[in-house]
Amino acid sequence: MLPQDPNLIDSLAAEYVLGTLRGAARRRFERWRATVPQVEERCRFWENNLMQLAKGVRPIRPPPHVWQHIQERLNLPRGGRHRRVGPALAIAASVLLVAGLSWLVYWRGVGQRPTEVASITTQAGTQAWTVDVYRGRLVVHAGQLPAHPSDHEFELWALPTGGKPVSLGVLPGAGTTQRALTEVQQQALANATQVAVTLEPLGGSPTGQPTSTPLFVAPLRASS
């Protein structure tokens, strides 16, 4: 079962790209990647970003005492330095790379904060959705949804100042959903102070614009 926590999915995608996700967990994640667009998008994100780290790496000849230390730690024979130095260096480099990139994964999954947030509540005061806007992605958490016809669903819209509403996608009926934002959506959010929710046919508005009067309008505020 695919986890609902977007931060966990993001961390699993990073581990998958790094190669530290192994065995049955890796095979299961590969099945998710093949069938779930959200997983595929996070894998592509990490492939594009982590691979950039390798481009600026230059080979450096370590000083003699580094080799001596590696030999002592790995219990290598002194006379076999030139013969065994390649595997030893590979092991040492792998450890450093995984440690460094693991810290990057941790920062990405835990340290990053949304740039803007919105809380969408019903007239009765119950929270229907919370919206977190990150750089390039949107995370929506469903709460207690209002009743609605089974052949319709809710759609989220950015309301840019002086412009037409821009769809941010269909809202989840339960759990959490995460999606990448297009340039048009990012620009709309950058120029918006509010988001709105309309009730649309299944799959979202067929016209690209709201087909009904907004049911909810919520302020989009900077994350504290």
Image (spheres, rainbow, N blue to C red):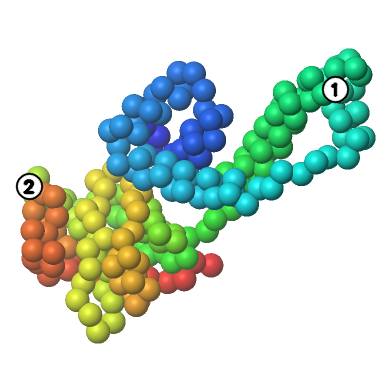
Residue at image location 54% in from the left, 46% down from the top: 50
Quadrant of the snapshot with the N terminus: top left
Residue 184 point in image, percent of width and height: 28, 67
Confirm or deny contact between disc 2 and disc 1 (CB under 8 A). no
Q: Amino acid at mark 1?
A: Arg
Q: Which residue is mark 2?
A: 151
Q: Is residue 143 visible?
A: no
Residue 8 point in image, percent of width and height: 48, 39
Residue 164 point in image, percent of width and height: 19, 76
User: Element type at marker 1?
Assistant: helix
Q: Residue furthest bottom?
A: 162
Q: Quadrant of residue 131?
A: bottom left
Q: Residue 222 shows which numbered tag?
A: none
Residue at image location 35% in from the left, 49% down from the top: 178
User: Element type at marker 2?
Assistant: loop
Q: Residue 81 shows which numbered tag?
A: 1
Residue at image location 59% in from the left, 45% down from the top: 54
Residue 210 appears left or right of 191: left
Of the pair 74 and 133, the residue shown nearer to us: 74
Residue at image location 13% in from the left, 50% down from the top: 203
Q: Residues within 10 Å of mark 2 (few under 14, many from 20)?
A: few
Q: Quadrant of residue 28?
A: top left
Nearest to viewer (mark 2 / mark 1): 1
Q: Residue furthest front?
A: 82
Q: Residues within 10 Å of mark 1 (few under 14, many from 20)?
A: some
Of the pair 7 and 99, the residue shown nearer to us: 99
Mark 2 or mark 1: whose residue is earlier in sequence: 1
